[in-house]
Image (tube, rainbow, N blue to C red):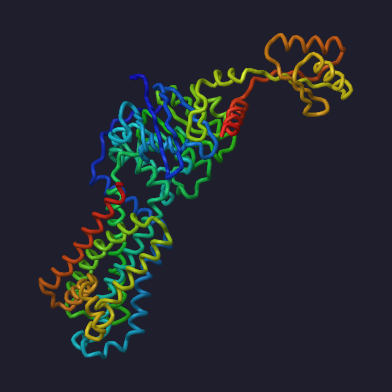
């Protein structure tokens, strides 16, 4: 065996580690066409089902201003897609954290927090692709015609992407704390469904019982959904968007701190 | 201590009630190969996990290249390579990409990373599989790739946790050659194994772990000399000859065994006994078809230590 040449590379900084690991995560996701195809199909299925099942809701008085239930539903679906993607982040992260690759990172001069940030960034790219496909599909198939036009729809997508990235941190934190597949599934279920339905996503809040209205009022999903609706309807105000981004950022902060604590312990 | 790549003092690792390591001490010289032998649960993996900074000791100290594994974990990580029991690869990307990503994480730029990956692929005869996704590589290929991955950053100390588990004999001896060559280049190697032949072939020093303690330590030759005896195996052509020989040797006072109808094994303590055996066969006019003298293997050492330990507990 010939001798290995010596290496003299210095070290990689935190931003470089995030970039390298995020790119690796993306390549891994793109390497499997089934993952790409069904990943893009999943939100479309979600949207088509809801638009048909809840069609009658479009006749409720709170929705008159939207023109059709689809215009009410699509911005909300952007947020629920962000929710399901964040749930997927947790599952994927769990597999990764206890797989061999992370085990190797643990004995390398690499920050595990960088690995977490990279995971969320790779998933944000996936989320963006899913949202663009959903908006295009609902324009072509379901007759989605937001009053805010293309710009309004894009602004809504951008807000949903930010919300999704923030929510990722909640699931990253849960994953690093729970550490078991079955437990994570149970916890994710308990977290996801109330977030999804105790909100303004599918029904106008005014149609709910009082305790649900209270739950909706403290649910960050409600604020995110209100903001994506306002943006796509072209009636967004600073306070609506500010409330949504503020609530999302608070989630990211709490989740991020908890995840950092759990992973570096 | 300057010559020691690894210093371990009073190292304890406890999982609840179970003591995986019950306070062990040893040192490893720079550029030497230490084999850590032990059965399942003896504490081998706990030891590697602590030395490679993945786990913290309950008590005691350990340093690698002069850096404490707890307080200066980052310094240690810059100087070590680790190959675990389960190939730590990124299954979704190619063999080359696996190496490139690790090099990039260690600070190489794109070009340097690619050059390094190609060098390692070449060194481990993996060039033909460079573009194959890691998940489609066979067990032997994965092991080689994993070892290559642990060498991306030119580690000064290399930890191999049961590296040859699941390898066929050819791949195993290839691995041994590689490890020996690395040590020849000045890399310090710690290898855990259950294969005594592996420790015998590779190691400069051996420690035997049992129930969290070091039960034996020394060079392979030293350990074998502690066991002390050689075994002579005589093969005859006729089973009546074997009967006669068995009787004569027993009369002479040596321990005899007869594993098959035509084979007799005798435990001897030195050359005089061997000469005696030759004289007996000559006097009885027995013609032999085989006569071999076997050194005790580390297996024998290991079994005798393990036996005495089980008796002790």
- State how many labels appear: 0
**Quarter where residue B101 is shown:** top left
Q: Position of residue A19 (x, y in %)?
A: 27, 49
Q: Spot the residue most to the right.
A: B240
**Quarter where residue A65 is shown:** bottom left
With A201 as the anchor, is B166 left or right in this view?
right
Q: Position of residue A167 (x, y in %)?
A: 26, 63
Is the residue A194 above or below the residue B35 in the image? below
Is the residue A62 above or below the residue A114 in the image? below
Is the residue B152 above or below the residue B187 in the image? below
Q: Say which quadrant the N terminus of chain B sits in.
A: top left
With B57 as the anchor, is A73 left or right in this view?
left
Q: Position of residue A54 (x, y in %)?
A: 33, 85
Q: Say which quadrant the C terminus of chain B sits in.
A: top right
Q: Residue at x 39, y 32 (%)?
A: B11
Whether residue A78 appears in this view of the structure is yes
Q: Position of residue B216 (x, y in %)?
A: 52, 25
Is the residue A163 above or below the residue B4 in the image? below
Give A115 or B191, whichever is nearer the viewer: B191
Whether residue B154 appears in this view of the structure is no
**Quarter where residue A168 is shown:** bottom left
Give B86 or B52, whichever is nearer the viewer: B52
Q: Spot the residue most to the left.
A: A238
Give B40 or A75, whichever is nearer the viewer: B40
Q: Residue at x 73, y 11 (%)?
A: B273
Q: Residue at x 29, y 87 (%)?
A: A57
With B178 as the anchor, is A43 left or right in this view?
left
């Amino acid at each position: 065996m010939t001798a290995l040449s010596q290496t003299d590379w210095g070290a990689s900084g935190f931003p470089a580690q995030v970039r390298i690991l995020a790119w690796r995560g993306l390549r891994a996701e793109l390497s499997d066409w089934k993952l790409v195809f069904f990943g893009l199909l999943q939100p479309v299925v979600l949207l088509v089902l809801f638009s048909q099942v809840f069609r009658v809701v479009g006749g409720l008085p709170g929705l008159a201003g939207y023109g059709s239930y689809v215009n009410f539903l699509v911005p909300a679906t952007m947020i629920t897609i962000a929710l399901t993607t964040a749930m997927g982040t947790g599952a994927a992260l769990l597999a990764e954290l206890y797989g061999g690759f992370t085990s190797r990172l643990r004995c390398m001069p690499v920050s595990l927090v960088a690995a977490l940030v990279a995971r969320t960034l790779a998933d944000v790219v996936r989320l963006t692709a899913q949202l663009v496909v959903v908006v295009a599909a609902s324009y072509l198939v379901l007759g989605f015609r937001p009053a805010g036009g293309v710009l309004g729809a894009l602004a809504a997508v951008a807000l949903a992407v930010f919300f999704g990235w923030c929510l990722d941190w909640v699931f990253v934190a849960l994953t690093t704390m729970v550490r078991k597949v079955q437990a994570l599934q149970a916890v994710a279920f308990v977290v996801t469904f109330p977030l999804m339905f105790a909100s303004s996503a599918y029904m106008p809040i005014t149609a709910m019982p009082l305790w649900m209205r209270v739950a909706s009022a403290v649910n960050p999903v409600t604020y995110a959904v209100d903001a994506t609706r306002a943006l796509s309807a072209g009636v967004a105000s600073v306070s609506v968007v500010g409330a949504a981004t503020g609530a999302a950022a608070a989630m990211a902060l709490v989740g991020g701190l908890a995840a950092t604590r759990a992973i570096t312990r | 201590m300057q010559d020691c790549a690894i210093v371990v003092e009073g190292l304890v690792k406890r999982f609840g009630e179970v003591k995986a390591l019950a306070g062990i001490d040893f040192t490893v010289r720079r550029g030497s190969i230490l084999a850590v032998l032990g059965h399942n649960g003896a504490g081998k993996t706990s030891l590697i996990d602590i030395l490679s900074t993945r786990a913290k000791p309950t008590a005691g100290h350990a340093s690698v290249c002069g850096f404490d594994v707890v307080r200066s974990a980052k310094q240690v990580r810059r100087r070590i390579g680790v190959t675990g029991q389960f190939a730590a690869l990124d299954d979704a990307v190619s063999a080359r990409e696996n190496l490139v990503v690790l090099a990039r994480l260690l600070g190489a730029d794109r070009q340097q990373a690619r050059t390094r990956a190609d060098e390692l692929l070449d060194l481990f005869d993996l060039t033909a599989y460079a573009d194959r996704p890691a998940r489609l590589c066979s067990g032997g290929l994965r092991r080689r790739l994993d070892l290559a991955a642990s060498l991306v950053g030119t580690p000064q100390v290399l930890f191999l946790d049961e590296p040859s588990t699941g390898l066929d004999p050819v791949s195993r001896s290839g691995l041994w050659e590689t490890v020996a060559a690395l040590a020849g280049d000045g890399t310090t190697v710690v290898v855990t194994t259950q294969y005594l032949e592996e420790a015998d072939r590779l190691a400069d020093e051996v420690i035997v772990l049992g129930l969290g303690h070091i039960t034996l330590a020394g060079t392979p030759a030293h350990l074998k000399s502690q066991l002390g005896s050689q075994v002579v195996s005589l093969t005859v052509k006729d089973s009546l000859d074997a009967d006669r020989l068995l009787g004569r040797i027993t009369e002479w006072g040596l321990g005899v065994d007869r594993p098959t109808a035509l084979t007799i094994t005798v435990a001897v303590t030195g050359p005089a006994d061997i000469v005696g055996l030759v004289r007996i066969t000559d006097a009885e006019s027995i013609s032999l078809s085989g006569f071999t003298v076997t050194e005790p293997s580390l297996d024998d050492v290991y079994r005798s230590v393990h036996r005495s330990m089980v008796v002790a507990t």
